Image (cartoon, rainbow, N blue to C red):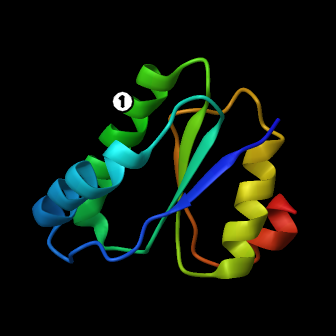
Amino acid sequence: MTMQVVRVRGLPEAPLTAAADFYTRVLPTLQGDTPLVLILPSADHQHRGWRAEVVASLARQFAPARVNAVVGDDEAAIAAATRWLADAPGVTGQVLQLDGQNAGVVLG
């Protein structure tokens, strides 16, 4: 099955502003007909709440299609996590925070 991968760029640094930007700019473009992985840039811990909520809400709304997010800036780690999610049919509503420390070895 095809997996939709959406790379989210240009989010503001402030958490509330970033959430508002995501909801107004990115959310309307998302479709729930295939599994979805959002690729989000690294951000400090203040962004965890809104990111977790948006992914959980989308997973409920788009069910049975799966929705997950990968957070990080290491392209190898992002690719490994995305491949892993493609083969993990029971995983949905999760935000995977990557640090780039051997994710390819663990998830590859």
Residue picked out by circle 1: 57
Side of 15 where 87 appears, left or right = right
Q: Quadrant of residue 15?
A: bottom left
Q: State the image coordinates of residue 64 (x, y, percent, origin top left).
A: 61, 18
Q: Tell me, yes or no, if residue 101 can be seen here.
A: no
Estimate how packed mark 1 is, as few (under 14), some (14 to 19) or many (20 or more) residues with alpha carbons within 10 Å.
some
Q: Residue at x 62, y 81 (%)?
A: 74
Q: State the image coordinates of residue 98 (x, y, percent, origin top left).
A: 58, 68
Q: State the image coordinates of residue 87 (x, y, percent, origin top left).
A: 84, 41
Outermost residue on the front side: it is 29
Closer to the camera, 28 or 84?
Answer: 28
Closer to the camera, 68 or 61?
Answer: 61
Secondary structure of the residue carrying numbered label 1? helix
Q: Residue at x 40, y 73 (%)?
A: 9
Outermost residue on the top side: it is 64
Question: What kind of residue is marked 1?
Answer: Ser
Q: Quadrant of residue 58?
A: top left
Closer to the camera, 49 or 22?
Answer: 22
Eyeballing the image, is 88 above or below 45? above
Q: Residue at x 78, y 44 (%)?
A: 86
Q: State the image coordinates of residue 54 (x, y, percent, origin top left).
A: 33, 41
Quarter of the image with the C terminus in it: bottom right
